Amino acid sequence: MGTKNIGGFSIFVSIGLLISTMVVKNQLDYMQEINLGYDKEHLVSLSYHYNMRGGIETIKNELLRSGAATSISRAADMPVHIKAGYKIFPGGDNQREFMITGYSVDTDLIKTIDLDLIAGTNFSETDPKRSELEELDDRNTVILNETAVKEMGWTVEEAVGKTINVGFNSNSEVKGVVKDFYFNSLHHQVGPLVIFNDPDQANVLLVKLPVGNPATHLATLEDVWQKLVPERPFNPVFVDQAYAHMYNSEQQAGLIFGVFSGIAIFIACMGLFGLVSYVALRRTREISIRKVLGATQQNVVGVLAADFLKLLSVAAILATGFGIWFSNSWLQDFANRTTQSIWPFVISISVVFLLALITIAYRSWKVYSLNPAKTLKSE
């Protein structure tokens, strides 16, 4: 492989890696900025052991009374990864069959995580809890998300008051409908969700902290917790951090691309510097003659740059093709992804071209600054 081919390959790798880095970063930024459909800020999850369920309502009330929480809800898990699978069977007002995710909560969930109730009403304390049902056909109340309602072929308004068969209960009444929210990774579309009034199946307390220093509020909550259940550790998990943790592999990929693109650009600049130096050395006599005839430094830069314009252009075209392939391949794993933009390509090519131009200009200045008399005499 010739010297110019090696230089061109290093430029191609530099541009390609820089494009990849920007594509990954744009998707990561999108995932952090997207509206999940609930408020994960200042939201903390406190897990508790199943043998604490009998006294958890007292703990919840005492935590609220401390003033270090504005709202608390019992829930099966954090809203970032709801996993329980159920099946909707034909029955009641619904004749369709499909899989659905279930979420067991208490009456305070909608307020605590700020879900958007777009039809019907929230659970009330008088609604029968799922764990209290004695017969399979006892009336039970549930809340669905928009996707579940669409699966049944209803409008949001039509869904309220309908009865469905959630498998464990053939007489579940739809009390309300919430706007779709992302309860899983953005690698997947929002699926159908049924929310049960079933705090006895909950495993965590979702605690909404007041605005302000969270450390102060958590310290107060910990004091209350330790007084009530000193034998159980107080382990708060911020929901926004748990959400970010879901994309550790993507963040690591972005970091790796960033590091390697920096290394590749450095190697490309060094290779380009050596290549430009080699070409300039071979054309020293020509440049000296041009200088004697009145050529400016800009003219000399133009002469040397022309030698590399084709090399840079070919590398940029190939890197653009690689960038398009990488964008399509990497983003296809995300059901929810940012729109592809031309800017990663424009910025990446511009950065590498600018560095190449600076390298050419510097080397041209070094050759241009030589004394033509000495140069021509030595030739």
Image (cartoon, rainbow, N blue to C red):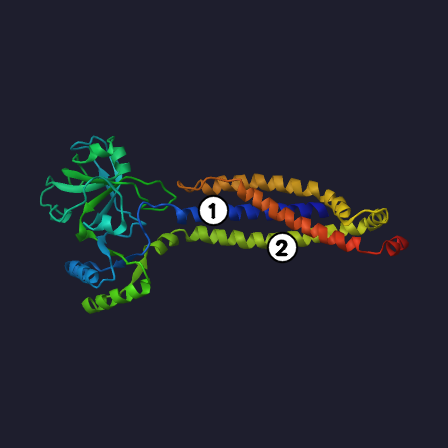
Name the residue rendered at 47%, 46% in the picture. Answer: 26
- Residue 254 at what x, y percent from top left? 49, 51
Position above or below: 96 against 127 = above
Q: Quadrant of residue 310?
A: top right
Comparing 89 with 287, the one in front is 287
Q: Is residue 59 above or below residue 160?
A: below
Number of numbered markers? 2
Residue for badge 1: 26
Q: Which x, y percent locates residue 118?
A: 24, 39
Locate residue 307: give its quadrant: top right
| Mark toward the viewer: 2 or 1 | 1
The secondary element bearing badge 1 is classed as helix
Indicate which disc residue 266 carries.
2
Q: Is residue 175 above or below residue 80?
A: above
**In the image, farthest residue toward the right:** 377
Query: Badge 2: how crowded within 10 Å, few (<14), some, or many (20+)?
Result: some
209, 81: nearer the viewer: 209
Sequence order check: which comes first, mark 2 or mark 1? 1
In percent of width and height, residue 300 lies at: 77, 47
Classed neighbour count for the residue bearing mark 1: other residues with Cα under 10 Å, few (<14), some (14–19), many (≥20)? some
Side of 362 relative to 255 (left or right): right
Q: Is residue 342 in view?
A: yes
How far across and how far down the image is residue 31, in percent?
41, 47
Q: Residue at x 29, y 50 (%)?
A: 79
Name the side, left or right, on which 36 lies relative to 260.
left
Q: Nearer the viewer, residue 92 or 366?
A: 366
Q: Secondary structure at mark 2?
A: helix
Q: Identity of the amino acid at label 1?
A: Asn
Q: Callout 2, which amino acid? A: Phe
Give the image quarter of residue 89. top left
